Image (spheres, rainbow, N blue to C red):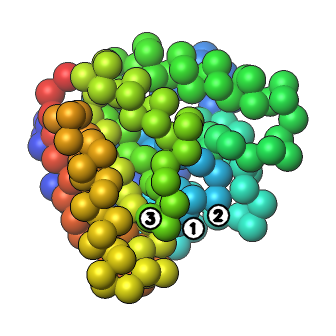
Amino acid sequence: MTSTTCEPQLLRKAEYHCAAHHPRDWVEDTGAEVAFAGRSNVGKSSAINAITSRKALARTSKTPGRTQQIIFFRVDAHFRLVDLPGYGYAKVPAALQQHWQKTVQRYLEERVSLRALVLPVDCRREPSAPDWKLIEWCAAADLPIHILLTKSDKLGQGKRLQALRAAQQSLNQMPLATAQLFSASHGIGIDEARQRIADLLSQTG
């Protein structure tokens, strides 16, 4: 019998399951999953790899916008991680951007097994308009969202904590939104993120 409590170390067992270009190809909508969303080039794939302790589970590329499908990773028979297409990359054709937007919107609105979103945001920059749109959508839908302030190794300790306080203050009217410092390359916040995602996966729908 599969446990409905996800232990943080279980995320290390994540493995590629499938890539879906159309909703008909999505994994069966049972169990629980946490999806990663975010702007292209913000470090989404690197975050997935660091949290799962798998160097190449999610493909990283010097060309942002490479993830053009919804990618499902199987943790066990009950739990999954999901990599949503990155947004905000200008070189992607408009028709493909529109397809991504419609597909992701449908996923967010219809996916019963979705427990939360993880949103990487560069800690050196303000969240983009699409970032805020996603954060506000989650707030309206009562869906938890956890923000990873990525590339935090680029800031000194004082600036780093200042960025975290600013993020937490901007989210203080959203009880289901949380934020933390993160750096895949320097190992900052990986254990914290793993614990938070495990807790979110363990929530009942």
Residue drawn at (45%, 23%), measured in percent from left and top? 108
Determine which of the numbered discs, if any, sits on residue 37 in the image: none
- Nearer mark to the viewer, of 2 and 1: 2
Residue behind mark 3: 123
Looking at the rendered structure, the kind of residue marked 2 is: Thr
Question: Does the rendering let one see residue 176?
Answer: no
Looking at the rendered structure, the kind of residue marked 1 is: Ala
Residue behind mark 2: 60
Residue drawn at (31%, 84%), measured in percent from left and top? 157
The C terminus is located in which quarter? top left
Residue 60 image point, x, y percent: 64, 64
Q: Earlier in the sequence, mark 3 or mark 1?
A: 1
Looking at the rendered structure, the kind of residue marked 3 is: Cys
Determine which of the numbered discs, if any, sits on residue 56 in the image: 1
Category of crowding for the residue at label 1, using alpha-carbon neighbours closer than 10 angstroms: few (below 14), some (14–19), many (at least 20): few
Residue drawn at (75%, 31%), measured in percent from left and top? 97
Residue 45 image point, x, y percent: 55, 59
Q: Earlier in the sequence, mark 3 or mark 2?
A: 2
